[in-house]
Image (tube, helix red, strand yellow):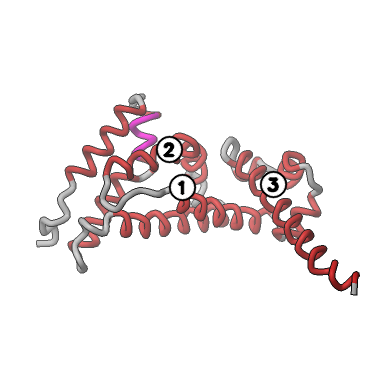
Amino acid sequence: MESGARRPYRMGARAAAVEVTRKRVMEAAAGLWMRRWYDDVTLQDIAGEAGVSVQTIINHFGGKEGLADAMADQMASQAEINRQAPVGDVEAVVAVLFAEYERHGDGVVMWVAQVDRVPAVARAAAHARRQHRAWLERIFADRLPASGPSREHALNLHYAATDVYLWKLWRRDLGLSRDDAERAMRDLLTSIDPRKRHDA
């Protein structure tokens, strides 16, 4: 009876340990891939950063591509959690986006630059785009047309105004301060009037 009572605890502890290991490996991989090209990071590099063996990574993720897929899913989920803002509040929307882009924007831009040659990166980028689009539909639900080409056009404008590449243009290419870049994004979003018919 005693061993049976302990078994659920042992299984729970084992599952928790597995999750901790997975998280540590994904964090190590994310840290490396935010600084270096995908092909330049080996499983040995990730294992060393995470303090585990290469075999442990293979056991958990099946290999480098499986790890990249898992990491992309986790980052998308975390972004969804962090992007909390009142519906239609442009100032709050810009604030949460810049909080994310200032932390991870350079790494995201580096990843996106590899989509044509790394399938795992292409899958991650496609997933991120879908997530961002779905988030925009929710966060700007009060100002998007109900349906049809006008809605798609308005959504495309909102997407362009909030894309990480626009952050890169302002912050990295043009050298704007964060305050000026945030103001530029707010002004751009405010200037979009989705109630007008753009498909006429």
Answer left or right for 170 relative to 60.
left
* Corner quadrant of residue 177: top left
| Residue 99 badge | 2
Is residue 110 within the magenta segment? no
Image location (x, y in percent) of residue 11: 79, 65
* Corner quadrant of residue 98: top left
Answer left or right for 34 relative to 96.
right
Is residue 167 within the magenta segment? yes
Quadrant where the N terminus is found in the figure: bottom right
Q: Earlier in the sequence, mark 2 or mark 1?
A: 1
For the residues bearing labels 2 and 1, Cβ distance under 8 angstroms: yes
Tag 1 secondary structure:
helix
Q: Which residues are magenta?
A: 166-171
Answer left or right for 11 relative to 76.
right
The kind of residue on which mark 2 rests is: Ala
Q: Earlier in the sequence, mark 3 or mark 2?
A: 3
- Please tell me which residue is depicted at 47% across the width and 58% down the height of the picture: 127
- Please tell me which residue is depicted at 21% across the width and 62% down the height of the picture: 151
Image location (x, y in percent) of residue 83: 41, 48
Could you tell me how far apart the alpha carbons at marks 3 and 2 are, in whole angstroms?
23 Å
| Residue 82 badge | 1
The kind of residue on which mark 3 rests is: Arg
Tag 2 secondary structure:
helix
| Residue 37 badge | none
Answer left or right for 7 relative to 66.
right
What residue does disc 3 label?
24
Tag 3 secondary structure:
helix
The kind of residue on which mark 1 rests is: Asn
